Amino acid sequence: MSSLRLDAFDFELPSERIALRPAEPRDASRLLRVRPEAAGNQFDEHLFRDLPHLLAPGDALVFNDTRVLPAALTGCRERAGAVAQISLNLHQRVSPNRWKAFAKPAKKLLIGDEIIFAEELSALVVAKGQGGEIDLEFSQTGAALDAAIEARGAMPLPPYIAKRRPADARDSTDYQTIYARQQGAVAAPTAGLHFTEAVFSALKARGISRHFITLHVGAGTFLPVKSERIEHHKMHSEWGMITAATAAELNAVRARGGRIVAVGTTSLRLLESAANDDGEIAAFSGDTDIFITPGYHFKAVDLLLTNFHLPRSTLFMLVAAFSGLEVMQAAYAHAIKRGFRFYSYGDACLLHRKGAQS
């Protein structure tokens, strides 16, 4: 792993570049193609709906089909007649009735406290960790708990949006991909938010295949990196699955000379977790805490479709590893100057891997 310092991944972003709503329609967002090996023409601009023509017949897009739970909950803790309002973001399921969550204000909670969300839904604090993290044991379990969370929760918008406006009814669809299937994420795989049925049809017509894997994105994706040496940062683990059939399909694509295009950093992290040193992808089911920084050797992924990420974040470190730190610093400077929109509801990048032919 790299021994780079955290400030190597810093940049200035004007607040007006942070998107608070997505483009309408979704595929009207902008797309910056970044080709590190294209001398003199590393960056070119498109609309997202142009994506099929930027790929080649035989390429394969790999999507994360996780579905976002409305995992932001507000409840009351009562102790000895004193009542405190508690805000929670669920971030990792531990068992059918237990979740890890980030609580605010966590200092008002003790192990054994009960948090009441509704007459039919409450939870006990069974453990406390660092940085406001707690473990909750809910009064309901399994599918009944999922339904109760759906009824009481709000979409867990990223902090940089939530600080500027509350979640509303639009976010229940805006913050969900059109192909979301597997319930369990508490943050959206945002690169997928740009896709429409029209883009899917155009991809099919061009001979580009679609494949689906699952990584339940956790709220840990938003946690800041606090270690000055990035190798000291600890990634939160997330659960993922690649079926044997999907792994075989992707290996066949590579054998035919097609390229693997990861839709989002979550898809990339899972694919790289499941690949051996020769790039062969195996079936996978379990947790991954893979942390990709400059110096990492990519095994399975040839192109990455992703949004524009926060400064000093693990996601910016990942794209710097993929296309080169200097290239991505220049790409982000270009995007800021050209008015691209950043973060979850912002525009997209199509990144070619450093060292690969453009």
Image (spheres, rainbow, N blue to C red):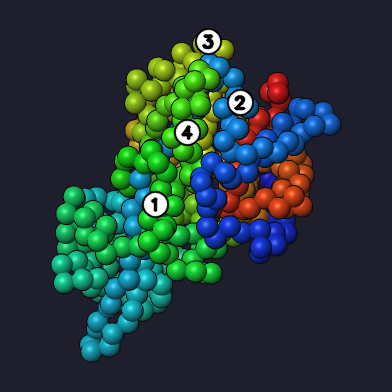
Query: Gap between marks 1 and 3, in whole Å?
Result: 37 Å
Badge 2 amino acid = His
- Say above or below: 79 vs 190: below
Front disc: 1 or 3: 1
User: Can you identify the residue that label 4 sits on?
Assistant: 198
Q: Residue furthest bottom?
A: 81
Residue occupying image coordinates x 50% and y 25%:
203
Residue occupying image coordinates x 58% and y 45%:
29
Badge 1 amino acid = Thr
Front disc: 2 or 4: 4
Neighbours of disc 4 within 10 Å: few (<14), some (14-19), many (20+)? few
Badge 3 amino acid = Arg
Q: Position of residue 185 (x, y in %)?
A: 37, 48
User: Can you identify the residue that label 3 sits on?
Assistant: 256
Residue occupying image coordinates x 34% and y 74%:
86
Choose between 358 and 32: the one closer to the eye: 32
Report if residue 290 is visible in the image: no
- For mark 4, give the secondary structure: helix
Q: Residue furthest top?
A: 256
- Say above or below: 161 vs 94: below
- For mark 3, give the secondary structure: loop
Dot placed on the residue nearer the N-terminal end, 1 or 3: 1
Q: Position of residue 175 (x, y in %)?
A: 43, 52
User: Can you identify the residue that label 1 sits on?
Assistant: 173
Report if residue 261 is visible in the image: yes
Q: Position of residue 176 (x, y in %)?
A: 41, 48
Front disc: 3 or 2: 2
Query: Gap between marks 2 and 1, in whole Å?
Result: 27 Å
Neighbours of disc 1 within 10 Å: few (<14), some (14-19), many (20+)? few
- For mark 1, give the secondary structure: helix
